[in-house]
Amino acid sequence: MIKGQRLRDGYLHPCTEDKAQVLWFSNLTTAEKELLQTRYHLDEHAINSALDPDEVSRIEFHPNYLFLIWKRPENYTGSSGFSFDVSSFGLLLSRDQLLLICDDDRQLDGIGAREPLVEPLDVLLDLLLNNIHHYLGHLKVIKMIARELQQKFNESMNSQHLQQMFNLSESLVYYVNAIHSNGTVLSRLRNHAQKHEYHSDCLALIDDMIIENDQCYKQASIYSTVFATLMDARGNMLNNSTNNLLRKLTVINVVFLPLNLITGIGGMSEYSMMTAPVAWWFSYPALIIGMGGLGGLMMLGLRRMAKTS
């Protein structure tokens, strides 16, 4: 699907493809891929890289245009088991036109909300800045979810909460990698802009983006490190809780093992035969008291062994 948009009064407005300053390619068909190859001279590798979620961010400079691949955070819905994903999209910037290549139709949401847009370069920079803020917003959500999961885990020691924490930790690793590669693209873009004497407002905005992206990267790295440490601590706590439960069950089995052995060997009929001269109202209470005393001695012995070990 192709959408055309044109800059007017500082904002983007829908228009026909032939008058568009911003062309938005999403959910590409075969014909649209061929159009990108023939009219805009993008090879098949570049198109596939722009749509590959595992592609690393990069930027390429050509005489008449630049092409970059940017890592973006996916929208979080809450139904994915606390998993935050990243994907890629491509941008082709020439002097008078910007091409956006992505796998959905939501990429230009919120563009132009902060500053008026004058040329396609402004759209590109505002798009990248919007994605950096998207990362920062997700990091805040991750921190809130992490605190809630820690409280639930401390209350119930449920392995399900530990799995959700693992999903968050894995997502942070992908975020750190994506934000770092985006920072490399911004640094190269800054050098290119300075070399080609972009206007001062553009250079200042790129500098601000580099600072914000670096802060975002450091914040994600700290969260990732803290989460990895907490995962180890929570895993050890869950193991200790399981070990204590197994220990209690083992103590119960050890205490009742000799009692079961006695009743299994003698049996109630044999015991009645052996205690025939004694009244039943004396022999059976004596048996119960004796087995209780034996169990108590076993418990005391196990506790003393646990203290000395």
Image: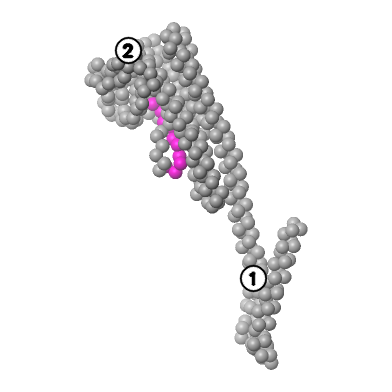
Which amino acid is tagged 2? Asp
Residue matched to label 1? 256
- How far across and down, in percent of the image, does residue 226 sit? 58, 36
User: Mark 1 or 2 closer to N-term?
Assistant: 2
Label ID, residue 17: none
Judged from the image, the secondary structure of the residue bearing numbered disc 2 is loop
Q: Residue at x 66, y 90 (%)?
A: 279
Q: Quadrant of residue 41?
A: top left
User: Where 39 falls versus 281 (above or below)?
Assistant: above
| Cβ–Cβ under 8 Å for marks 1 and 2 | no
Label 1 to label 2, Cα distance in Å?
86 Å
Residue ranking furthest to the right:
308
Q: Is residue 38 visible?
A: no
- The residue range painted magenta reads 80-89
Q: Residue at x 57, y 42 (%)?
A: 231
| Structural crowding at the residue carrying mark 2, measured as other residues with C-alpha within 10 Å and reported as few (<14), some (14–19) or many (≥20) | few
